[in-house]
Amino acid sequence: MNNLSDERDYLATKRKSLLTETDINNHLQKIKERYQGKKLLVIGGAGSIGSSFIYEIVKFFPDSIHIIDPNENGLTNLVRNLRSKDNKTSQIKLLTSPLDFGSKISDQFIIENGPYDDVFNFAAIKHVRSEKDIYSLMQMFDTNVIKHSNLLNLLEVNNLTKSYFSVSTDKAANPVSLMGASKKIMELILQCKHFEFENKIKTSTTRFANVAFSNGSLLQSFSIRFEKREPIPAPLEIKRFFVSHKEAAQICILASCNLSDGNILVPKINDSFKLYPIIDVAKNFIESKGLNPVLVESKEDGFKIINENNEDYPVVTTKPDTSGEKEFEEFVGLGEEVLDSNFVNFNVVKYSDFNKKELITFVNNFNLLLQGDVSISKTDLINNVKNIVKNLNHIETGENLDSRM
């Protein structure tokens, strides 16, 4: 990542030093020993977090990195950026392929090019807005749950790796959205207890906050709208935890290097990590352009300000009333156990106990859905998910972000 990215991320984090800095320095030697000279597989490596992770992990000089992502242009830019770095980094062996995670071709690629010392999976349906209908929900649970289960089975049966890491979300703690619930089930899948075989793969995950200005995020839309001279929308009364791209990548490195058994790395809520209003991030962005932010209630009022060509720029305030949105964020769910750890700014949450039979039934039934053998309604799917995620408190308001700016 470059200074421009750091300056942009600072508009949301307001941290002069990285949240991860102390813990990375404390574990630096262990990280070096873990990844130097190793062969890594990164799935979803062209996305915001995946590519940021690769830019950080190359600093520890693995021997080779294989990268899978359907975004062909993203892979091309990633390789160009890596090859243009200093001589030692640019000599790392890279193999990229524009494949869909979980496809038969992707599986064949992994079998024929493995085994790997570590597998990192950043592929996900990560937006709450993607749970608007049964079709998007099926895709969400397929990507976030079923494909992980299938891949872990493939890796174990073929002895393809000793370590598997994937990203969860803060929304998995006491979930109110189906996206959060899908990630909670993914956390259970990582334990591999629903398989008949005895798992030997060490697994880990992390719940961290919103990655500032990540692909597809509201914050990323600020610059796109500004370039098109459109008003910038931001919800009222919503505060969020933000991490920079570099912090997100380093959190993943800390988790994968230090955790196992499906345990979860989460940030500690302290003076280094505070809630920040999204409205304030929008104001910071406009001020960084040398303009004065003005709050308005409608898009029409916003365009009036823009058309006046003065030093003001509009922020359209919106109500936080869409389905599945929490008023606040949290990283530890009710009944979850925080383990002792040697981290300064992070906690380790112990993996959750669950009913193995119920999880197997859910996975098997969902595979039948994906094969088209049976159909299901959104209501029935929610009820099936609640059999696994007992504390799911799904919030359905009838409002979806597709109807908003």
Image (cartoon, grey):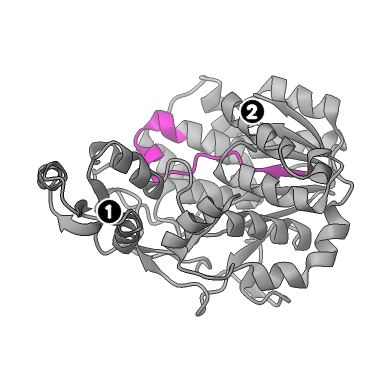
Magenta stretch bounds = 119-137
Q: Secondary structure at mark 1?
A: strand
Q: Inspect this view and state whether residue 211 appears.
A: no
Identify the amino acid type marked 2: Thr
At which x and y percent is residue 292? 23, 59
Image side of residue 266 versus residue 282, left or right: right
The crowding category of the residue bearing disc 1, from other C-alpha atoms within 10 Å (few below 14, some 14 to 19, many at least 20), is many
At 80% from the left edge and 49% from the top edge, which residue is drawn? 163
| Label 2 to label 1: alpha-carbon separation | 33 Å
Which quadrant does the C terminus fall into? top left
Query: Which residue is at the front of the view, 280 or 339?
Result: 280
Q: Is residue 294 left or right of residue 76?
A: left
Q: Identity of the amino acid at label 1?
A: Ala
Q: Is residue 92 above or below residue 392?
A: above
Taking the magenta stretch, the answer to whether it contains residue 126 is yes
Secondary structure of residue under mark 2: helix
Image spot of residue 2 (x, y percent): 59, 50
Residue 255 makes an appearance in the image: yes
171 or 146, nearer to the observer = 171
Q: Is residue 342 magenta?
A: no
Q: Which residue is mark 1?
A: 234
- Residue on which the image places disc 2: 76
